[in-house]
């Protein structure tokens, strides 16, 4: 067996920032420390923090008055921020800056009187938070078929935004349909789909041509990980989205297969290494790293944590 280890893979800058933020907050404030929704969509990461005493909540009523609450990398709506203030919570905002960018675009378009079409998946934490910025001005679009059914009050005051973790190809199909139906539709000056999502998709698209089987490390509720597996299947490959080596089934493979291994943006490198070792032991696999693009993006810690660290140093 030959393993192609895709690069880039795994943690993006936003996930790194969120995880480092939670690690630091636990050291500074102790536990229980609360996080609104999962800090990132990955089972291993979430369970690790649960063991340390972090409590993940879906409703602010679960957080004691005056406690410390971190907002996850996916962002929250103004309503959540207001409710946090009403409960006197000490909040730490670990929203990915690329998600914040989409929130600010939504606010700007809404204030200018636009109807905003948000391309994304219903129920995803990021979509809920973004739509909360301008609920009266925003319509969710999930497919080209949704575009065909759209009716808007003024086609000359129309803009689209996208969830940051979408499939580039899926988003472009919807955008193309939007431009056909609404030629004057506006869009932000820079693409909303994040650099890491695009890079990981590009690696799968190029490298899956050389593989028979594709393993994507990531959790089922991770949108960007789901897209990687879908992309590999669209290339005609057998692709499996797994949390770790315990999910691997030996009958997925032939002894001489070429297997592409990658990881979604919220999957830790530890689970990648564990899966590679699993295949090496059982199939005497060799490993070849194949990096199609280098990433050097880094996001600073949230302002709330930087201020505490700075005060401690001074």
Image: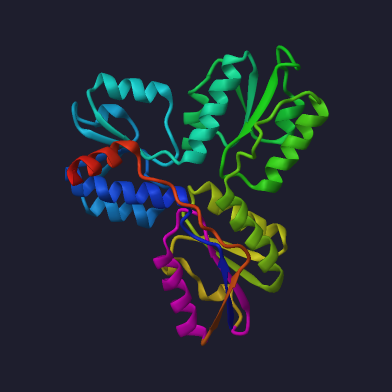
Q: Which range is magenta? A: 255-283
Instruction: Evaluate whether residue 272 shows in this view.
Output: yes
Q: Residue at x 61, y 80 (%)?
A: 254
| Image point (32%, 21%), residue name | 83
- The location of residue 53, given as percent across then percent down, is 21, 48
Above or below: residue 145 compared with residue 289 = above
Q: Quadrant of residue 212?
A: bottom right
From the viewer's side, name the closer residue of 71 and 278: 71
Q: Residue at x 19, y 30 (%)?
A: 64
- Residue 137 in sight: no
Is 294 in the magenta?
no
Q: What is the x, y in percent for residue 68?
A: 23, 35
153 to the left or right of 41: right
The picture places residue 314, in percent across and down from the top left corner, at 18, 43
Residue drawn at (64%, 34%), measured in percent from left and top? Answer: 142
The answer to which of 47 and 25 lies nearer the viewer is 25
- Asked whether residue 274 is drawn in magenta, I would say yes
């Amino acid at each position: 067996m030959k393993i192609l280890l895709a690069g880039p893979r795994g943690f993006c800058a936003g996930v790194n920032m969120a995880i480092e933020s939670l690690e630091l907050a636990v050291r500074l404030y102790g536990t229980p420390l609360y996080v609104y929704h999962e800090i990132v969509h990955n089972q291993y990461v979430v369970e690790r923090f649960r063991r340390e005493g972090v409590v993940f909540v879906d409703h602010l009523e679960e957080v004691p008055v005056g406690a410390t609450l971190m907002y996850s990398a996916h962002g929250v709506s103004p309503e959540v921020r207001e409710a946090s203030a009403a409960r006197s919570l000490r909040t730490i905002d670990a929203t990915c800056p690329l998600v914040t960018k989409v929130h600010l675009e939504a606010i700007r378009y809404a204030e200018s009187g636009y109807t905003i079409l948000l391309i994304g998946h219903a129920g995803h934490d990021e979509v809920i938070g973004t739509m909360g910025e301008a609920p009266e001005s925003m319509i969710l679009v999930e497919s080209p078929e949704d575009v065909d059914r759209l009716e808007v009050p003024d086609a000359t005051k129309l803009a689209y935004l996208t969830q940051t973790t979408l499939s580039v190809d899926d988003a472009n199909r919807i955008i193309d349909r939007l431009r056909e139906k609404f030629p004057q539709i506006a869009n932000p000056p820079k693409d909303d789909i994040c650099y890491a999502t695009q890079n990981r998709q590009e690696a799968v698209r190029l490298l899956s041509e050389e593989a028979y089987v594709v393993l994507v490390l990531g959790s089922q509720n991770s949108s960007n990980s789901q897209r990687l597996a879908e992309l590999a299947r669209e290339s005609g490959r057998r692709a499996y989205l797994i949390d770790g080596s315990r999910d691997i089934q030996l009958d997925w493979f032939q002894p001489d297969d070429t297997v592409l291994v990658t990881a979604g943006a919220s999957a830790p490198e530890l689970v990648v290494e564990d899966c590679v070792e699993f295949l090496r032991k059982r199939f005497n696999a060799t490993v070849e790293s194949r990096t199609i693009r280098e990433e050097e993006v880094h996001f600073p810690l949230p302002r709330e944590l930087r201020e505490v660290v700075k005060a401690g140093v001074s």
